[in-house]
Amino acid sequence: MRRSMLFIPGNTPNLLMNADVLGADSIILDLEDAVSPAEKDAARILVRSALRSLGYKGCEVIVRINPIETDFWKKDLDEVIPLRPGMIMPTKVSCADDVRTVSDYIAQVEERCGMEKNTVRLIPLIETAMGVENAFAIASADPRVAAIFLGGEDLTADLRCKRTKEGNEIFYARCRMVNAARAAGVDVYDTPFTDVDDIDGLYKDAAFAKSLGFTGKASISPRHVAGINEVFSPTQADIDYAHEVMETIRMAKAQGKGVVSLRGKMIDAPIVTRARQVIEMEKAIFGGTEDDE
Amino acid sequence: MSKLVSSIKEAITQMGLRDGMTISFHHHLRNGDFVLNMVMDAIAEMGIRDLTVNASSIFDVHEPLIGHIQNGVVTGLECNYMGGKVGRAICEGLMEKPVIFRTHGGRPSDMEKGTSHIDVAFIAAPTADPMGNCTGKYGKSACGSMGYAFADAMNADKVVVITDNLVPYPLVDYSISEIYVDAVVEVEQIGNPAGIVSGTTKITRDPVGLKMADYAARVIDASGLLKDGFSFQTGAGGATLAAAKYIKDIMLQKNIKGSYGMGGITAYMVDMLQAGCFEALLDVQCFDLDAVESIRTNPKHMEVTATHYAGVSGKSAGVDNLDVVLLGATQVDVDFNVNVHTDSNGYIMGGSGGHSDTAAGAKLAIIIAPLTRARLPLVVDHCLCTSTPGSTIDVVVTQRGIAVNTKYGKNQELKEKLLAARLPVCEIEDLKRMAEELAGVPKATAPQGRVVAQVLYRDGTLLDTIKAVK
């Protein structure tokens, strides 16, 4: 399940130790912007040790590495790939080649370590104007790509405009990202809402992202996780309707009916697909497995 | 008639203080207190020796006590809580006689039962009149409630009130009556206001603390106790305050009208009173300026004595009707015994305060603590000191799991309720294992020196001893 994706600075031991209890579906152990150049080595060691000893059961682990223009990204991958994080987040990805460069190096590390190939997936962070224009190429560049992620802060710097709470300046990028991701068959995450104390604003921003088609939303604050999860979870009405749809379909099949309707509306394939997705999410959220905390 | 005397030394002389006696102090001025040190310095200068000091709490500001102990002025120490500075010296063998630790309820009750005798009580009073009527609600050193000082005033042979705000007789809204007071001394300053109460007490922003607070609030909600008539106590720690805020949100959302909030009172409890979550606050001690302002102005915010709060000598006490208390811990063992006296190396850095009193009284006593601190597991096989018996603890809440205490033939139903509420219920041994997986198994550190402190339970029986570290 991918609703919330929480950034954890790679140089904060107490947060690293507790990253998996903060309610996020995915955690991003950050080696990039949260870590100053002088602390890159220390953070890399800390993240490596955290991956080795903490397990992080019940949430997807993503490591955000440094951009490929820097000296750090290969070292980042050398250290973390052997510990099999779920995903790697390359940063400032502007074209398909950037993705393939990272993917190829991951393959080298996998081979060097005797790991099965292509186990580690990618979630490219798109945060430049060029990246947005190339979103579909990036999303479909490599089989490792499982999702793409819009970074609004760097993007607005590149666009030479001000980042606002309303987000009109990233509206085009949001739409383009969603379309590209869906066309490529991968998930898509929205940029974080950066006013940590504005919980109402967070709800609004998340609801808007959901309405555009985003899979989920990233967060820089643990205090935003619950709100994001709530917004990106199906409502009880959604769940009830999904069950009704599936029950109607089941009954129609039993009666040998071809076309069925519910509440005067024909149930077609997209409605069934949507109902299945809702029921899957319901199971993931309330399924009663040990991992649902 | 006036009971005013010219100086602390004059009062000491008039009260007939001599070698071998026991004197007492309260701790409402907390780490801003000047009075204990002023009185002890005067006593030392007068050449009186071999005294026992019974102070409801010793803070770091009382570090000069160490010198008085080294010089033989003080040879006995009794308290309910001791800060790390004096605590460390005690654990390094400062004093021959073991320190006696009581609880906030046990101390006044022992005085009332006569098992703890006070010769002279020195009562710091933020406002007093010349006959000794006094209160903490007014004055430049206002501390709000003076709950812990009542037993001293009522039971000591001689009582000296020391104030920095002398007002004309009669002080109208007094807390402690003149009928108990022998002498009044006016001094320039009884304390440093910045150390007496915090400007504000703040809810934690630490995400782990908030997670624990969220779990604690959900435990309380799921327990079935959160309904009309609810009574509640919480400490002033960041995570417990956050839990109180979550409880308030639930109460307002479900329109639950509680009965009373109790304990050391913070702005958050005042806020709950004002929001209609409680009918009253029972306040034995104020922690911040909002609480002081509230006790001064809101008749529903009541000052209660330590006996009324938590004692065992009265016919009943506030703790007896408490539904839920949220408490902290430095260590919890697999039998749910709780240590709040020592750190993990065995050095004294705290004390029961009202911990074991409220745990014994409350229907639901919840420990809220992080699974590890500074790479040390919270849950251990045996606490270095048992401050509160495991039989009185019901639930341990950590960020990674919630252990329900079913070891003493209780709480099975509670456990089922928490499971039904989809809370991460586990066994206490699971918490220990999880902590050790994260932090490793710590090297055992059990101090082996002579006994430096005795921990008395609220009924006066010996609960545990603390040994010298060096």
Image (cartoon, coloured by chain):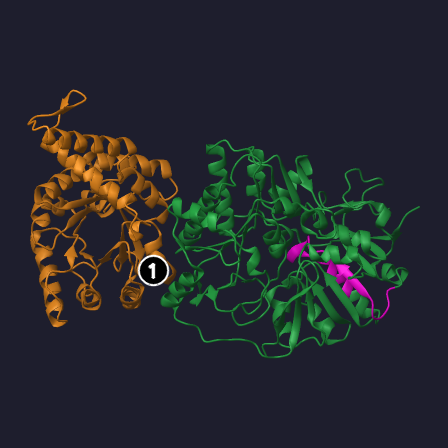
Of B227 and B384, nearer the camera is B227
Of A22 and A33, nearer the camera is A22
Q: Colour of chain A?
A: orange
- The answer to whether residue B367 is above or below residue A211 is below
Image location (x, y in percent) of residue B396: 48, 55
Q: Which residue reaches farthest front?
A: A255
- The answer to whether residue A244 is above or below residue B326 is above
Within 10 Å of disc 1 (Cα), the crowding (few <14, some 14-19, many 20+) is: many
Res A164 visible:
no
Query: Which residue appears at 10% of the width and 69% of the height?
Result: A111
Image location (x, y in percent) of residue B263: 62, 47
Left or right of A52 in this view: B64: right
- The answer to whether residue A32 is above or below residue B259 is below
**Number of numbered tags placed on the structure image:** 1
Look at label 1 and name its amino acid: Leu
Res A86 visible:
yes
Residue bearing the label numbered 1: A16
Chain name for mark 1: A
Query: Residue A89 appears in which quarter of the rendering?
Result: bottom left
Query: Which residue appears at 35% of the width and 51% of the height?
Result: A22
Say which element carries label 1: helix
Of B340 and B191, nearer the camera is B340
Image location (x, y in percent) of residue B451: 65, 75
Left or right of A245 in this view: B78: right
Q: Which residues are magenta?
A: B17-40
Left or right of A131 in this view: B341: right
Query: Which residue appears at 61% of the width and 68% of the height?
Result: B85
Does the magenta segment cover residue A168? no
Can you say which quadrant of the picture contains the C terminus of chain B? bottom right
Q: Colour of chain B?
A: green
Image location (x, y in percent) of residue A153: 25, 46
Query: Which residue appears at 31% of the width and 39% of the height?
Result: A230
